[in-house]
Image: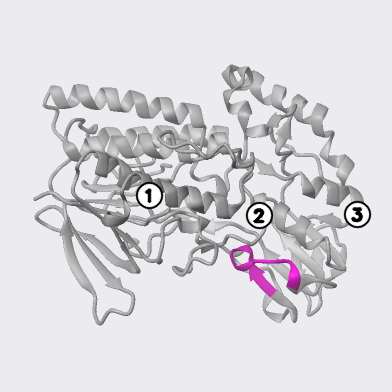
């Protein structure tokens, strides 16, 4: 009897569960925490949420919602994390998902079986022993913003630094930093927002970034900036879109050099956008001091690449997250350098019955892509669509990675970066092609699972 395992009850796992439930596909969903929501549950007892107390979305509510359930009209344009959790709880309740979810249950091992299918080992919180179950398919939806990534190798002198040092995953409120000299390392969304928040009460706040980045305001021309994805600008070819967006930013925000930031070398579409309104204000006020990359630490100082040295009492590493799957053997599947060898960010070509959700990072919200991705996975499970051959998928992955390297910055953070519209179109094309393959009795993936060969792929 076919039965699917879904790992995680965050946004990706909920979307997968909703689609499988609507199609009457038998499945179990395992969630290590006590409730749904994943990273959106503040203080989640699964230990994986890095949400801080004041966090609001940097994407508008219209873009954040699943296609099957809108956020309430009463919700502000940029919702607080508590409202996003309430929305996800409503989503789970609206589609009757709680009865499928085993809370407080952590998956510890997933491995392929020689005769097909997957062995899943899980442990219930407080339970006496691990439990082993067998599934025909496994949907991995454990997220990619939970495993903190620190500089590697470590910054010289970091072990001698006498102040406090944490990753932004462990940041909750600015209270511990009042009156202190604080260094925030990074230039992503968390770095920008945390530096701005800390600077209200800190004695001094430094924001250190190795590379210049485009800083987007949350609102452009009176509309949420993410609405640009639906504007006429998005239909322009990339050759024109990039300079058009650069001009729009300059007209609405001015040059970042006016705020003391270095001028970005690459175009605004070459990297994941960093969005913050408050940081620009705090930079203009002098409450935040921009600095280049950190060269080394002393006991109470930080030396920067421009030769300057500053006294520092505390460091917050806003240096992103690793993509990791602790329940999968690295020899079976891993994400070296932040890249995943997945066809359409979903299928490992030579591991039949294993699927991944939510490992496609658009410049805007990922929520609207999750249900279409889950629909495709459900169709593959049902057999109404057939995948390409493993060899074809491997070739397509390699081709996509070559294209990716020409489009985005070659950093860990951008390993799963995608264009929202292009990915959505690709999913639609693949689902149509898969239906044709299924009608033509094209052979599906081989029955025996095994490790995928190494390939230069996304």
Residue plotted at (37% across, 37% down): 371
Q: Are marks 1 and 2 in contact (CB under 8 Å)?
A: no
Position of 302 with respect to 394 (left or right) is: right
The answer to which of marks 3 and 1 sits earlier in the sequence is 1
| Image disc number at residue 92 | 1
The location of residue 425, given as percent across then percent down, is 41, 25
Quarter holding residue 207: bottom right
Mark 3–mark 1 distance (CA, rounded to whole Å):
45 Å
Mark 3–mark 2 distance (CA, rounded to whole Å):
19 Å
The location of residue 170, given as percent across then percent down, is 60, 68
Is 56 magenta? The answer is: no
In the image, the segment drawn in magenta is 165-175
Residue plotted at (49% across, 27% down): 421
Quarter holding residue 15: top left
- Location of mark 3 (residue): 286
Task: Kindly give the residue lying farthest to the right in the view shown.
Answer: 285
Is 174 magenta? The answer is: yes
Residue plotted at (33% across, 75% down): 125
- Viewer-proximal residue among 220 and 93: 93
- For mark 3, give the secondary structure: loop
Figure check: 11 above or below 237: below
The answer to which of marks 1 and 2 sits earlier in the sequence is 1
Answer few, some or many: residues within 10 Å of disc 2's Cα (few below 14, many 20 plus, some between 14 and 19).
many
Query: Which mark is nearer the camera, 1 or 2?
Result: 1
- Location of mark 2 (residue): 190
The location of residue 115, given as percent across then percent down, is 9, 55
Query: Which mark is nearer the camera, 3 or 1?
Result: 1
Mark 1–mark 2 distance (CA, rounded to whole Å):
27 Å
Position of 155 with respect to 67 (left or right) is: right
Figure check: 106 above or below 193: below
Residue plotted at (81% across, 77% down): 300
């Amino acid at each position: 009897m076919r039965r699917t395992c879904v790992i995680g009850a965050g946004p990706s796992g909920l979307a997968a569960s909703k689609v499988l439930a609507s199609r009457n596909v038998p499945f179990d969903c395992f969630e290590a925490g006590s409730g749904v929501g994943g990273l959106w549950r503040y203080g989640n007892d699964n230990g994986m949420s890095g949400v801080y107390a004041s966090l609001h979305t940097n994407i508008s509510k219209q873009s954040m919602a699943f296609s099957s359930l809108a956020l309430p009209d009463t919700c502000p344009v940029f919702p607080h994390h508590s409202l996003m959790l309430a929305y996800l709880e409503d989503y789970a309740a609206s589609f009757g998902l709680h009865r499928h979810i085993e809370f407080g249950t952590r998956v510890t091992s997933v491995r392929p079986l020689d005769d097909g299918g997957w062995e899943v080992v899980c442990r219930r919180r407080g339970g006496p022993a691990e439990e082993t179950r067998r599934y025909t398919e496994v949907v991995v939806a454990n997220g990619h913003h939970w495993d903190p990534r620190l500089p590697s190798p470590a910054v010289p002198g970091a072990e001698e630094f006498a102040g406090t040092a944490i990753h932004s995953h462990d940041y909750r409120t600015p209270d511990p930093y009042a009156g202190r000299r604080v260094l925030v390392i990074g230039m992503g969304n968390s770095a920008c927002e945390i530096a701005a928040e800390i600077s209200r009460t800190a004695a001094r706040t430094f924001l250190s970034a190795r590379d210049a980045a485009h800083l987007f305001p949350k609102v452009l021309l009176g509309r949420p900036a993410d609405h640009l994805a639906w504007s006429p600008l998005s239909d322009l070819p990339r050759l024109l879109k990039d300079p058009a967006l650069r001009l729009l930013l300059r007209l609405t925000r001015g040059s970042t050099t006016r705020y003391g930031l270095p001028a970005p070398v690459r175009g605004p579409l070459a990297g994941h956008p960093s969005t913050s309104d408050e940081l620009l204000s705090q930079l203009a006020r002098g409450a935040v001091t921009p600095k280049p990359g950190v060269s080394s630490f002393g006991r109470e100082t930080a030396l920067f690449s421009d030769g300057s040295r500053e006294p520092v009492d505390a460091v917050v590493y806003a240096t992103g997250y690793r993509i990791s799957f602790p329940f999968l053997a690295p020899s079976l599947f891993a994400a070296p350098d932040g890249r995943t060898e997945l066809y359409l960010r979903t299928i490992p070509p030579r591991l039949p019955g294993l699927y991944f959700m939510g490992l496609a990072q658009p410049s805007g919200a990922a929520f609207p892509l999750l249900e279409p991705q889950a629909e495709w996975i459900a169709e593959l499970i049902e057999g109404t669509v057939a995948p390409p051959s493993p060899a074809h998928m491997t070739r397509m992955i390699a081709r996509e990675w070559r294209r990716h390297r020409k489009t985005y910055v070659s950093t860990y953070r951008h390993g799963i970066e995608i264009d929202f519209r292009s990915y959505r179109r690709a999913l639609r094309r693949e689902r149509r092609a898969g239906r044709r393959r299924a009608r033509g009795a094209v052979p599906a993936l081989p029955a025996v699972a095994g490790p995928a060969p190494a390939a230069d792929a996304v």
